[in-house]
């Protein structure tokens, strides 16, 4: 094992760096994971990087395996795909050499309980599995919105989450789904996903259901304008400490519109008696076994360049979707081979 193990930290608002992350000995029931890829959840991680998490949300915004505290220094992130190198105990050893997903910050190697990792399903390449957390968010948003057969649905914001929501809704029989974004270039993404892209001025109104995921208050105003009588708007954007103004005059009350927040940190009450977070994430991973979703990966960067990439994404994202981070050795894990990652058998 290399002497140096590094992790990405936001040291202070607007300043990130790779710092040593010493590894302690494994305990029973734990696994050592070597990262292959991680992903940047651009909206949330940009707010964290810029120091825009409100003090009231410091505890609710904590990520699994986060170290430090907001506004910094903090080690934050929750999209990691790796391979289990070592396990301690029968359940952990059974995961050896398996590619797995974990809600862990950006780090070369890390130790977590075996229950914290999810083996990738057959047919899912590790490189695409970085979309799992975004897919989980999209699933939760769809549960909150409850789209139905034949619904006219608008999704405002063709980022990763919005595109995944539209992709899921488009699989419901009879739905008429439009993916709306101010960037004409998003039409290529929509086409790759089998979706219809519209600029806001060309979008069809009188929708049964509208999702907003643009991260911009102007997009939420568009969502309100597209909603039909008694329709619901599912707000999936989070603005951190920013104040948001809404056009709640005009016909807002006459049309009896409802705005409802959706947040992946809680299971919807109608699901919680039967679902838990692991089952939801397992569903997210299964749904990613579709090569068309590779269109949501807009770039790949070596781990060593992560500090510069995070700074750029936080201040000048320029249409970025999911930015994937590649770790040393990732090239040996390009394809999805169940139970065979190319590594030799391992034990604690």
Image (tube, helix red, strand yellow):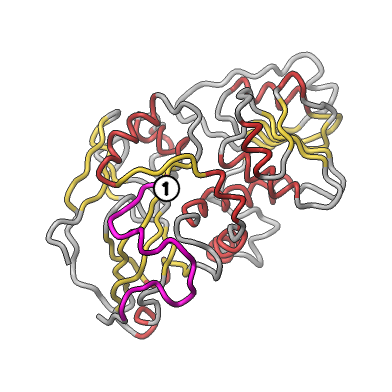
Direction top: furthest residue: 250
Q: In terms of image quadrants, where is residue 281?
A: bottom right
State whether residue 167 is above or below residue 308: below
Instruction: Give the image location of residue 172, x and y in percent.
Output: 79, 52
Image quadrant where one finds the N terminus = bottom left
Q: In terms of image quadrants, where is residue 55?
A: top left
Residue at 51% across / 38% down in the picture? 321
Q: Residues within 10 Å of mark 1 (few under 14, many from 20)?
A: many
179 sits to left or right of 313: right
Instruction: Give the image location of residue 121, x and y in percent.
Output: 54, 69
18 sits to left or right of 193: left
Magenta span contains residue 331? yes
Residue at 50% across / 44% down in the picture? 297
Instruction: Give the image location of residue 73, x and y in percent.
Output: 24, 39
Query: Front-most of 218 and 334?
Result: 334
Direction left: furthest residue: 3
Q: In this picture, which residue range is highlighted in magenta? A: 324-344
State whether residue 150 is above or below residue 208: below
Query: Front-most of 329 and 156?
Result: 329
- Disc 1 is placed on an element classified as strand
State whether residue 126 is above or below residue 188: below
State whether residue 63 is above or below residue 219: below
Q: In terms of image quadrants, where is residue 31?
A: bottom left
Instruction: Give the image location of residue 226, x and y in percent.
Output: 78, 26
Image quadrant where one finds the C terminus = bottom left
Magenta span contains residue 172? no
Q: Can residue 211 be spotted in the picture? A: yes
| Residue identified by numbered label 1 | 39
């Amino acid at each position: 094992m290399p002497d140096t193990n590094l992790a990405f930290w936001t040291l202070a608002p607007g300043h990130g760096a790779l710092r040593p992350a010493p590894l302690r000995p494994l305990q029973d029931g734990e696994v050592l994971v070597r990262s292959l890829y991680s992903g940047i959840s651009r909206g949330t991680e940009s707010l964290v990087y810029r120091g825009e998490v409100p003090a009231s949300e410091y505890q609710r915004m904590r990520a699994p395996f986060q170290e430090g505290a907001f506004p910094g220094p903090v080690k934050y992130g929750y999209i990691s795909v790796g391979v289990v190198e070592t396990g301690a105990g029968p359940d952990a050893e059974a995961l050896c050499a398996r590619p797995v997903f974990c809600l862990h910050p950006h780090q070369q190697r890390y130790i977590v309980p075996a229950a914290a990792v999810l083996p990738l399903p057959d047919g899912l390449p590790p490189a695409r599995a970085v979309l799992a957390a975004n897919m989980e968010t999209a699933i939760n948003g769809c549960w909150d919105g409850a789209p139905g057969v034949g619904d006219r649905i608008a999704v405002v914001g063709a980022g990763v989450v919005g595109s995944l929501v539209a992709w899921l809704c488009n699989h419901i029989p009879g739905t008429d789904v439009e993916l709306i974004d101010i960037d004409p270039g998003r039409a290529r993404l929509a086409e790759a996903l089998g979706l219809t892209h519209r600029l806001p001025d060309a979008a069809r109104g009188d929708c049964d259901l509208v999702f907003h995921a643009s991260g911009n208050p102007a997009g939420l105003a568009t969502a309100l304008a597209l909603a039909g009588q008694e329709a619901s708007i599912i707000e999936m954007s989070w603005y951190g400490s920013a104040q948001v103004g809404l056009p709640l005059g005009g016909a807002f009350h006459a049309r009896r519109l409802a705005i409802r927040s959706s947040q992946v940190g809680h299971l919807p009450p109608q699901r919680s008696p039967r679902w838990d977070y692991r089952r939801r994430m397992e569903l997210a991973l299964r749904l990613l076994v579709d090569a068309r979703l590779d269109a949501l990966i807009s770039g790949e960067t070596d781990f060593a360049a992560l500090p510069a990439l995070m700074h750029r994404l936080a201040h000048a994202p320029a249409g970025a979707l999911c930015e994937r981070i590649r770790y040393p050795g990732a090239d040996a894990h390009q394809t999805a081979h169940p139970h065979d990652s190319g590594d030799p058998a391992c034990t604690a």
